[in-house]
Image (cartoon, rainbow, N blue to C red):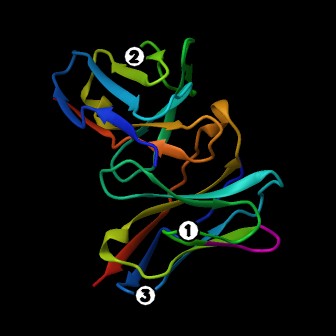
Amino acid sequence: DAKTTQPPSMDCAEGRAANLPCNHSTISGNEYVYWYRQIHSQGPQYIIHGLKNNETNEMASLIITEDRKSSTLILPHATLRDTAVYYCIVRVSSGGSNYKLTFGKGTLLTVNP
Amino acid sequence: GAVVSQHPSRVICKSGTSVKIECRSLDFQATTMFWYRQFPKQSLMLMATSNEGSKATYEQGVEKDKFLINHASLTLSTLTVTSAHPEDSSFYICSANIPGGTEAFFGQGTRLTVV
């Protein structure tokens, strides 16, 4: 799986949009960009994923650059409960052992009141 | 969404004893489950892939005789930490995917403390 680079930490004011960047310059054509987050002392939680088109769900939006070498996760209105470590992972989306995930260090997002 | 449940959520055991952690997929069947370990202030590290009906596949550096994995049914995988030592104290997390699905679902994790 391609490696990713994320800033170690970011701060965001409550109610504002949080934009979390991720670089994945070695991504392959069949690799998806996945985002998970981990709130302290809990298991990771799936947020969103995409291949090349921008994606939006009830939690967040994912913006992928045209060359697919980077992406941005957007939390439109951050709340205190969004404080967590956010992991950007690129991987092939297929079954069996390919479901395993390789976690980097992620970005610690701190939402401040 | 799909639910993966781990039990116990927290366990304290004496050095030299064994501890079993259960991972269940509550509303779907999972032929493959994954076990991760996370030390304080570090990221998750994959330990092994649990395969229903066959032997688990361990990542490099993980002792298969120390971390016994059993995946006896399509909804249950167990991780047994044998002869636990204080350095095995960690946060253990399992995950599973719905067959044909694209995202992983994680258990809530098990905090193991070996004293």
Q: Residues within 10 Å of mark 1 (few under 14, many from 20)?
A: few
| Helix, strand or loop for disc 2 | loop
Q: Amino acid at mark 2?
A: Lys
Kindly report the distance in space between the C-alpha atoms of the residues bearing marks 2 and 1: 41 Å
- Badge 3 or badge 1: first in the primary sequence: 3
Residue B83 drawn at (x, y percent)? 28, 15
Callout 2: chain:
B
Tell whether position A66 is magenta: yes
* Residue highlighted by disc 2: B66
Q: What segment carries the magenta color?
A: A62-68
* Residue highlighted by disc 1: A57
Tell me, yes or no, whether the two marked residues, 3 and 1, touch with CB atoms within 8 Å.
Answer: no
Q: Is residue B21 above or below residue A71?
A: above
Locate the C terminus of chain A and report the quarter of the image it occupies: bottom left
Identify the residue at image location x=29%, y=20%. Answer: B20
Residue B17 drawn at (x, y percent)? 21, 15
Callout 1: chain:
A
Name the side, left or right, on which A52 lies relative to B70. Answer: right
Tell whether position A101 is magenta: no
* Residue highlighted by disc 3: A16
Q: Nearer the viewer, mark 2 or mark 1?
A: 1
Q: Quadrant of residue B110?
A: top left
